[in-house]
């Protein structure tokens, strides 16, 4: 059967985008950005601190990294917990050694359940992002709006109370969103979110309650995606990060400042056989005189001041 012609009719068909969420533009034609101190590349290292329930409901979908074996899935549960008991401290040592200013995306339930870990992370310094309640609270199509609204409000209220930070940013677990997520984030005081991976620089994202900023946090060089999903060697991951930094620096010298953002997990790279590869990447990036390492909100503020 021939395809019904109505299948190719879009109500907002036009040059650029077929929706009103954000404007279309080519990166190479945008206004050049200058980072503080004349730096060319802003480095944002984002650490996800997560609590995976041992018996996830998986509604409306099961999140990546969740339990896969029959209950109790101790094999995978304890691997995730390793990151919060051991791996994160290897991260903190590496950050201190190489002068890295990290950002931490934290499940509110983890912050509540592990006060000692939260204290150590806050003592280290760094911005905290909202990361929903836990890794069994997906923000996806099919989720009741009232349920999602309660999850977002409860997560942010608790995280703000426990950290003493305003918590301006958000990273959805699995980077999943429902059609209501951006509106709910904006109405709960979020300035920027990190779920969309379609750019190298921030851009305005429209909601009914005002604009959010979409901050670039690519999946393509995320440790879990490269090492666990694509099954690349750890040394290959480190080289990919270094390659990305060199490419973005080259672009920045010609077109204006760029952002290199790394999404990493203590239960992945915090392993004893992997931590040296994180250190390899951090050593190479921190040795570049044109790199400015800062938190996500600090980078966004510098960008917005020139927008």
Image (cartoon, rainbow, N blue to C red):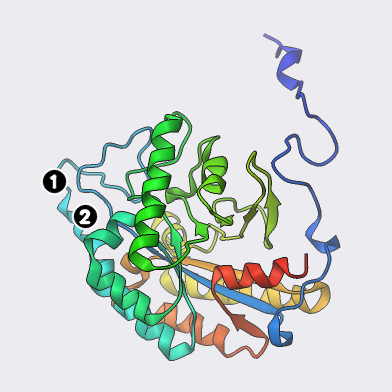
Position of 305 with respect to 81 (left or right) is right
Position of 96 with respect to 44 (left or right) is left
Relative to 69, does residue 245 appear above or below in the rendering?
below
Mark 1 = which residue?
Answer: 72
Mark 1 or mark 2, earlier in chain: 1
Relative to 190, does residue 166 appear above or below in the rendering?
below
Q: x and y percent of residue 205 in the render?
A: 67, 48
Q: In which quarter of the image is residue 78?
A: bottom left
Q: x and y percent of residue 176 in the render?
A: 48, 44
Q: Are marks 1 and 2 in contact (CB under 8 Å)?
A: yes
Mark 2 = which residue?
Answer: 77
**Residue 50 or 9: which is nearer the viewer?**
50
Question: Which element type, helix, strand or loop, lies under badge 1?
Answer: loop
Crowding near pointer 1: few (<14 within 10 Å), some, many (20+)?
A: few
Q: x and y percent of residue 186 in the render?
A: 56, 48
Q: Which residue is drawn at 34% across and 34% down?
A: 59
Q: CA gap, disc 1 to disc 2?
A: 8 Å
Question: Can residue 271 be seen in the rendering of this structure?
Answer: no
Question: Which element type, helix, strand or loop, lies under badge 2?
Answer: helix
């Amino acid at each position: 059967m021939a395809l019904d012609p109505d299948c190719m009719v879009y109500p907002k068909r036009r040059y650029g985008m077929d929706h009103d969420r954000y404007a279309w533009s080519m990166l190479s034609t945008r206004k050049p950005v200058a980072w503080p101190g004349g730096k060319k590349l802003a480095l944002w290292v984002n650490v996800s601190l997560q609590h995976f329930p041992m018996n996830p409901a998986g509604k409306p979908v099961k999140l990546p990294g969740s339990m896969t074996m029959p209950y109790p899935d101790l094999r995978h549960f304890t691997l995730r917990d390793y990151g919060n008991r051991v791996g994160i401290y290897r991260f903190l040592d590496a950050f201190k050694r190489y002068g890295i200013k990290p950002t931490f995306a934290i499940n509110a339930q983890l912050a509540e359940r592990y006060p000692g870990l939260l204290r150590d992370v806050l003592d280290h310094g760094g911005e905290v992002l909202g990361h929903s309640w836990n890794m069994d609270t997906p923000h996806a199509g099919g989720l009741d709006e009232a349920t999602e609204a309660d999850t977002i409000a409860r997560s942010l209220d608790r995280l703000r109370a426990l950290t003493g930070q305003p918590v301006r940013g958000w990273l959805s677990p699995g980077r999943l969103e429902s059609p209501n997520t951006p509106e709910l984030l904006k109405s709960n005081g979020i300035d920027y979110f990190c779920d969309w991976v379609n750019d190298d620089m921030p851009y305005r994202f429209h909601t009914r309650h005002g604009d959010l900023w979409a901050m670039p946090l690519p999946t393509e060089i995320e440790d879990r995606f490269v090492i666990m999903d694509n099954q690349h060697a750890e040394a290959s991951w480190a080289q990919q990060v270094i390659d990305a930094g060199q490419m973005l620096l080259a672009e920045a010298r010609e077109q204006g400042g760029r952002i290199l953002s790394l999404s990493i997990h203590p239960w992945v790279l915090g392993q004893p056989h992997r931590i040296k590869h994180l250190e390899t990447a951090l050593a190479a990036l921190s040795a570049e005189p044109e790199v400015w390492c800062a938190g996500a909100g600090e980078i966004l503020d510098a960008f917005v001041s020139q927008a």
